[in-house]
Amino acid sequence: MKFGGTSVATADGWRTIVELIRARREAGLRPVVVHSALAGISNQLEDALKHAAAGDGVDDARAIADAHHVLAGDLGVDGPALVATEVAELEQLLSGIRLVREVSPRVHARVMALGELMASRIGAAYLAAEQVPVELVDARDVLVAADDGHDNERVRYLSATCDFEPDPALAARLADVGDVILTQGFIARTAQGEDVLLGRGGSDTTAAYLAAKLGADGLEIWTDVPGLFSADPRVVPGARLLKQLSYEEAQEIASTGGSVLHPRSIRPARRHGVPLRVLCTHNPEREGTLISADPVSDAPRVTALSSRGGITVVSMETVGMWHEVGFLTEAFRCFSDLGLSIDLISTAESNVTVTLDTAAQAVDADVMPRLQRRLERLCRVEIITGAEVVSLVGRKIRATLHEIGPALEAFEEHRIHLVSQAASDLNLSFVVEEGQAHRLLQDLHATLIRPGSRDPVFGPTWEELQAEAVPVAPTPPAWWRARQGELLAIAAESPSAYVYDLASVRAACERLTGLDNVERVYFAIKANSNPEVLRTVGDAGVNFECVSPGEIGRVLDLFPDIDRQRILFTPNFAPREEYEFALGEGVFVTLDNLHPLRHWGEAFRDRDIILRLDTGQGRGHHEHVRTAGAQSKFGIPLFELEEARELAATAGARVVGLHAHTGSGILKADNWEDVARTLADIAAEFPDVTYLDVGGGLGVPEKPGQRALDMAKLDASLAAIRAAAPDYELWLEPGRYIVAEAGVLLATVTQVKGKGEVQYVGVSTGMNSLIRPALYGAYHEIVNLSRLDEAAEQIVNVVGPNCETGDRLGNDRLLPACREGDVLLLATAGAYGYVMSSHYNLREPAAEFVI
């Protein structure tokens, strides 16, 4: 029984674990419990390593200890005493790293192992206090890492493998220890006694190794989701629970990007015939996903779609390989000698292209250059990093090609580096450019996943399961629920309508202006330029960020006497006259590339300017809103900073601010601390810098159950920057955060129709009013406002009236039975809705209303 980090991180989770252990014992079974680190602790340990290597993070060990003390207190056990030894070792290791400013793989493994060791001590103490006859067994005394014989030190220490042959001696030894065994996941030892890790997510693998070695009757992986799904529900909300799978299908799903199970966890269970179940601690009564030797259905079908990022493509080309005996042997030896595992392969007469899953393999920074040098002795080499793989997984894929064919139109506008059809006939994979996978998953899932009635493989959709689930973290009801009558009255006047709630706008502004460690907040008015919304924002003390002269003009029309320093102009690839207009108005001007300084330097003489930098790492809910990294058109790359400083000096311009914006829809509170640290480090090279603009991208919950951005945590993270760099003002420039939740789109049902199992609800407007679902694959919660109190009972596709296949507002949505004239409401539509609307098909977009 393996329990993940979220399962073991709360007292409620532990009460469920105790009940499950007792139920297994009552059934005559002896539980072996595999314990993960507490949720978030592995990430904190990784951050502590980074901070220590930079000479920072003196409080990191204490924060990690405090998290364990809090859980121990909730469980009624003595946390400080239980984890004192591990905390002391952590502090000692981090102090050593701060001295040498380096983290070796050996030390990395020792630090990361402490997460499981601390958590398991608390878990064992709680089980004993609950009268469970438990014995804590150190996993490092049970699992010995295999010596793979290569020279990749990171793989040896951070992604080790172990033997999993049946071990009667181990079974007999544990039988004498106690009725319930508790041990750690993720960690093992070498034959020489050094700590190693089994790779991130390796607790699943630990459980599988032990199940195989002990000849267990079953293997249960307890997580925070109800099982495996036909796609990632975070990307495809209509993804369906997979009730039963064969080992082979489950292996393909895990290996091709399914994040619920670690790919290494299936092979031991399969080899020794141990049935595996994926179950949910929050809903332990659910059947979950059963993985066994039984394929359930032998019919050809696509069962799931998955994707992986962080893929490296290696293309080897030479006419000399044609009919040359041993070429592949020599080429592949270059990979194996460096401890690199090849993932996909495609061959031609003069080219062999392979992929490496560098996100799953621990790879030293110098490994890829070393690989290139070795391969260049044999052939011409091209290495492409940051690619993504989209995989179709199922049974007898070759027999479904006639059905898959039309779906492949989804790839029409995407560059494909490689296509690989598995020899096992279990998957068909496409290697595409970075940032394309999520949209392709949505398109392919809507076309290829077609469950029938009483389907033995496909269960309920994610949305159906969420509707039945007890909310983990209840959130306040949305404003529009209390104003149902007003909204229905507006829809009666205007069947398609955007409606903005100004009280919600004011509340968002107050949360932002209430941040102690942010001096100025600028609203990105491209998100919503409605005059009443802008008046509300300006009156709340929030400033304005504009990207065009038209937006500057809108602000000046509404606030003719505004202090021009309350306007920030951030154009992108704009003509010279736009910069001159903004400079003439006296507003702050941001440059996001060096062309203006190189070619129009005289325009900036004696002017204060801000430089927008590309920190190299983009984040966000969709690739099109990640605004940093090589694939983004925004920002000055860091390698051009020296030239930027020289050009500004030559032009006579003063660089008074630095700006970076990594993306949109970010719910991770420490994102802006990372940005601010980077800007503060760079600011030392620009003596006139006063302002550090850490951008926007503050996310809002879009799906039921999502947690809101923790503003107190955001403020606290920025406080550390203020303390370290007190001479700088910190700015934020949110857009969606202020207006997204304040706006809804109302659309009236025009027709309903069914095509077999697929049901459609047509509404009065579509992509001409809200293009985000078609353009980004963006998710908006959809409810039937006319039937708010009726039970949802149908899975439907909500579509617009435009003559376009992509005119879909939502796929596989759970709604009450809809009728002509009903009003549907699309939530979080206040940002990038009306401002991006069009007259496509010569249809009027939804009108705007303010309440």
Image (cartoon, rainbow, N blue to C red):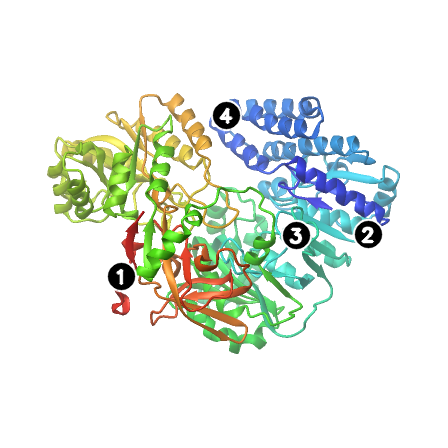
Q: Are marks 2 and 4 in contact (CB under 8 Å)?
A: no
Report the amino acid beneath label 2: Gly
Q: Secondary structure at mark 1?
A: loop
Q: Which residue is under mark 3?
A: 264
Q: Secondary structure at mark 2?
A: loop
What residue appears at the point 58 percent right and 72 percent down from the top-left corner?
A: 397
Report the amino acid beneath label 4: Gly
Q: Nearer the viewer, mark 3 or mark 1?
A: 1
Q: Position of residue 239 (x, y in %)?
A: 55, 60
Q: Which residue is under mark 2?
A: 215
Q: Which residue is under mark 4?
A: 57
Front residue of 280 and 622: 280
Q: Is residue 161 visible?
A: no
Report the amino acid beneath label 3: Arg
For residue 838, the mark is 1
Q: CA distance from mark 3 to mark 2?
A: 18 Å
Q: CA distance from mark 1 to mark 4?
A: 50 Å
Comes first in the chain, label 4 or label 3: 4
**Residue 116 sits in which quadrant?**
top right
Q: Is residue 132 visible?
A: yes
Q: Position of residue 644 (x, y in %)?
A: 24, 36
549 sits to left or right of 218: left
Whether residue 626 is situated above or below residue 783 in the rendered picture: above
Please rate how many residues cluster around mark 4, counting C-alpha atoms within 10 Å: few if below 14, some from 14 to 19, many from 20.
some
